[in-house]
Image (cartoon, helix red, strand yellow):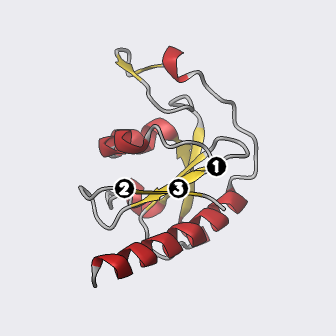
Amino acid sequence: MNWRAGEAAAKSACRQTTNFCRYLSSYQMPIADAGSVRYAGCMSWIFDQAPNVACIADRSIMDGRPVLTVAHYEDDHSWAFLDGSLFDPADALVVAMSEVVDRHPDLAEVADLPSGWSATRIAKGQPWLRLKDE
């Protein structure tokens, strides 16, 4: 697959996943002041939601698969972390943000993702493609 075809496929998958996860995360979550939240007693937490705030996660990423799609919703500032494959609602988990970040510390690369944006990549270690949600 050439780079352009891969980019188009990633954009399409990201949009489809974002639409479905928006449906799953239709409840309100409190917004944390990222600068004041402490994580693990010493490390500063860099996401806009507190470590104990709920997010949507694919079961597979909690079992070790890499996170390839991230959505940060504009309406409630919630997050979704997915493996980039076709999303199955039966595999959706509601977990604390810290549970995902503990398993995937490379998510620090997208902690600054603005609300209303999504990010996707083709494999772990590859650059993130950031897209403003429509």
- The residue wearing badge 2 is 128
Between marks 1 and 2, how big is the CA–CA gap?
17 Å
Q: Give how far across and how far down residue 31 sits, in percent.
A: 66, 29
Q: Is residue 70 visible?
A: no
Q: Secondary structure at mark 1?
A: loop
Q: Secondary structure at mark 3?
A: strand
Which label was assigned to residue 118?
A: 3
> How many residues crowd mark 2 within 10 Å: few (<14), some (14–19), many (20+)?
some
- Residue 84 horizontal side relative to residue 96, left or right: left
- Residue 52 horizontal side relative to residue 45, left or right: right
Between marks 1 and 3, how big is the CA–CA gap?
8 Å
- The reply to whether discs 1 and 3 touch (Cβ–Cβ < 8 Å) is no
Q: Nearer the viewer, mark 1 or mark 2?
A: 2
Residue at 50 percent of width and 39 percent of height: 97
> How many residues crowd mark 3 within 10 Å: few (<14), some (14–19), many (20+)?
many
Image quadrant holding the C terminus, namely bottom right
Q: Secondary structure at mark 2?
A: loop
Mark 3 or mark 2: whose residue is earlier in sequence: 3
Q: Amino acid at mark 2?
A: Trp
- The residue wearing badge 1 is 73
- The reply to whether discs 3 and 2 touch (Cβ–Cβ < 8 Å) is no
- Occupied quadrant, residue 95: top right
Mark 1 or mark 2: whose residue is earlier in sequence: 1
Residue at 44 percent of width and 28 percent of height: 46
Residue at 44 percent of width and 77 percent of height: 8
- The reply to whether discs 1 and 2 touch (Cβ–Cβ < 8 Å) is no
Task: Relative to 46, say whether 117 is above or below.
Answer: below
- Say which of 81 and 127 sits in front: 127
> How many residues crowd mark 1 within 10 Å: few (<14), some (14–19), many (20+)?
many
Q: Give how far across and how far down residue 123 sits, in percent.
A: 28, 64
Image quadrant holding the N terminus, namely bottom left
